Image (cartoon, helix red, strand yellow):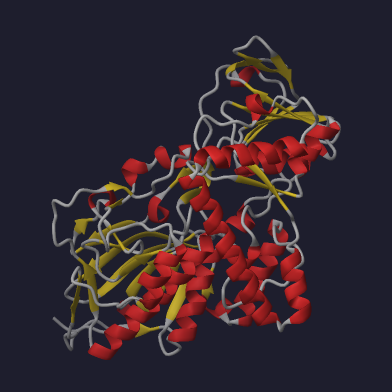
Amino acid sequence: MSPPRDADLPEHVDVLIVGAGISGIGAACYLQRDHPSKSYAVLEARGATGGTWDLFRYPGIRSDSDLHTLGYEFKAWTSNKSIADAEAILAYLRETVAEYGIDRRIRLHHRVHGAAWSSSDARWVVDVERTDTGERKKLSCRWLFCASGYYRYDQGFTPHFEGTARFQGRVIHPQHWPEDLDYSGKRVVVIGSGATAVTLVPAMANTAAHVTMLQRTPSYVLPTPAEDLFAKLARKLLPKKQAHALTRRKNIALQRFLWRFCQRFPRAARRFIRFVNARELPKGYPIDEHFNPPYNPWDQRLCVVPDADLFKAISSGRASVATDHIETFTEKGLQLKSGRELEADIIVTATGLNLQALGGIALTVDGAPVRLPETVAYRGMMLSGVPNFAFAIGYTNASWTLKIGLLCEHFCRLLTHMDAHGHTICTPELSDPAMPTRPLLDFDAGYVKRALDTLPRRSDEAPWLMSMDYHADVKLLREGAVVDPNLRFSSHVRPASTGIVAAG
């Protein structure tokens, strides 16, 4: 048999990054900084960069973490607003893309459907669809880095509600917000109590006739200043990079303190949050009915409201909260189990997200399908038994990108080690296949619980932990050794008859 011609071979890169959101852009920057000689490409299924911050278009969309930590360590956040809206975050991300030359490596409208690892070739062959033309093609890579986040971009979560078809107004999910929606002077009910709901209510209350946040279960809501006065002072006294670094360290410490305080002293944390809420709401407001969850603080993520905007909307009478269960939709709105009826012109189902592990990519290793629930996460970034594959999942108890930065640093250190020792294959392997495991994410949010049986597993034993502690991860991922007894390295010599087509 004659050897394959170059024209028959898939285009090849050293590293293929899936996703051009905050994680994928960060991964590309770290890779380009630490391994400038390696070829790479970033594939994005949608027609624009920015991931979450380009997808969601609902009113008021903003971060629920400060941008000094949600932003990158290597690029200063210089805006006065620490809790920023999507437009500002998008501008920051796209400025990063242009500044670091990542735009030349991003391929929009490229959806990855599957990836097949071949040990004999020591590479992945990736099945890609052009979402704008429908064309299917193959790419190959030494390493596959999945930075697609963990929820579905094409479908939000909406539970079944009785009588939905009877409602004569509009029903909208925030993930699919209509550009032409005019809610001025309209009665709006927002179903939900999470980050999306507490963002929508004050934003819509500015022009709607009235907005009601209908929740089945309350959430912890914590007001925070939209602007960081410490950061503003630091920028006046210090150069930009030093001011960013100092503010970042301060905010990391505050996030860690708040989370540890809530975990260690949940009753005191509950009392503190209630005190802050009472200070922002009218005297006599039923706080324990609407803002006193049945779970402890940080069992689910705290909702942050900049400058107490939600409480201001409630205090002004432009918004209200109803804590009840939905009996059925009616022609005019919602019938609640308490017997109360909420009339509405628009109902927004801010009822959550659907998780999708690894962006829905189907993986195979030497022809055998990878069943994610049968794998265990290694250092929160690789999968047992899956060679040359990394993924990026950030923190659920702090800014997402804090974890992403450490994972990317460790990934680049791993590549450096492999290059120095002539290794081409790296595979995490369980030393004890009978090791007890737990769900990947120890988080009580509904969107997580609904998807746990589709996700990889984790353990309480290192290095199979899914750490949510930044300082512990600094020691492990930034300062700790790359070599580990559970990580098997090997070298592969490519047969002379096998070629690759390199991409610049």
Query: 229 left or right of 47?
Result: right
Residue 174 place in picture, x, y as percent: 63, 41
Residue displayed at 70% across by 41% down: 276
Query: 398 left or right of 365?
Result: right
Residue displayed at 20% across by 48% down: 436
The answer, for residue 180, to whether it is visible in the render is no
Query: 127 left or right of 54?
Result: left
The answer, for residue 196, to whether it is visible in the render is yes
Residue displayed at 55% across by 65% down: 22
- Comparing 150 with 114, the one in front is 150
- Dividing the picture into quadrants, the one containing residue 251 is bottom right
The image quadrant where one finds the N terminus is bottom left
- Dividing the picture into quadrants, the one containing residue 465 is bottom left
Eyeballing the image, is 268 above or below 123? above
Eyeballing the image, is 190 above or below 261? above
The image quadrant where one finds the C terminus is bottom left
Residue 240 place in picture, x, y as percent: 70, 81
Query: 324 left or right of 341?
Result: left
Total tally of numbered discs in the picture? 0
- Comparing 242 with 45, the one in front is 242
Eyeballing the image, is 113 above or below 268? below
Residue 220 place in picture, x, y as percent: 60, 39
Residue 477 place in picture, x, y as percent: 38, 72
